[in-house]
Image: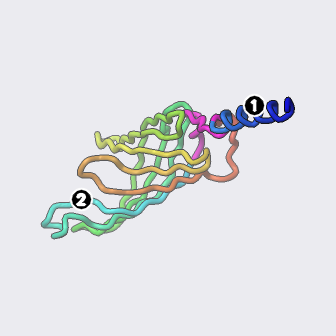
Amino acid sequence: MTKRRIFTIVTLLVIAAAPNLYAAHCSNASLHGTYAYSSQGFAEVTPDINATGFVPWAQSGLIVYDGKGNITSGTFTASTTTANGGSFRGTFTGTYAVNRDCTGAAATNLGDGTISNFDLLVERPEKVIVINTDPGGFMSIFTVRKIMGEKDEGEGR
């Protein structure tokens, strides 16, 4: 009888503690290093450019997170079907904040005063999902993957 009670108590303690064993423990340090990204979506345009008010948009590039809340550098190549069409390239910097539950937000600055805002989800330090949250902006989902071969020292999660 005593063995059964001890077993029951231990089992209940393990069950009660189990959610905490797998709880997310993210922080700004969860993002550290160079990540490659790509996206597809739509950009909002005026009706004289496209009667629907949207044009397809694709983008790829690199982004560097410092593990302390700063996007120290980023590059992009974007392509869309606007009146002048074609591709264009640029650079950006920014900031980010990762919550303990692995959600967060980021803001990028193109250097010309253009700020873009994003929500993010850190699946693991090697993979981040990001969505643009600007009102009237383009809807774009990014899958960001860490460049392989980089040192992972100092990363938290």
Sequence-earlier tag: 1 or 2: 1
Residue 94, position as x, y percentages in the image: 42, 38
Residue at 54% over, 45% down = 122
Q: Residue at x 61, y 37 (%)?
A: 23
Residues drawn in magenta: 20-34
112 in the magenta segment: no
Seen from the viewer's position, the closer of residues 21 and 73 is 21
Q: Residue furthest left?
A: 48
Going by the numbered disc 2, the residue's amino acid type is Glu
Q: Quadrant of the C terminus?
A: top right
Q: Secondary structure at mark 1?
A: helix
Residue under numbered circle 1: 9
Taking the view exactly as shown, the residue that stands out farthest to the front is 1
Q: Are the residues at dot 1 and dot 2 in contact (C-beta closer than 8 Å)?
A: no
152 displayed left or right of 65 = right
Residue 114 lies, in percent from the top left, at 29, 43
**Residue 150 % position (x, y):** 68, 46
Please tell me the numbered disc located at residue 118: none
In the displayed structure, 87 sits above or below 9; it is below
Q: Quadrant of residue 36?
A: bottom right
Is 33 a magenta residue? yes
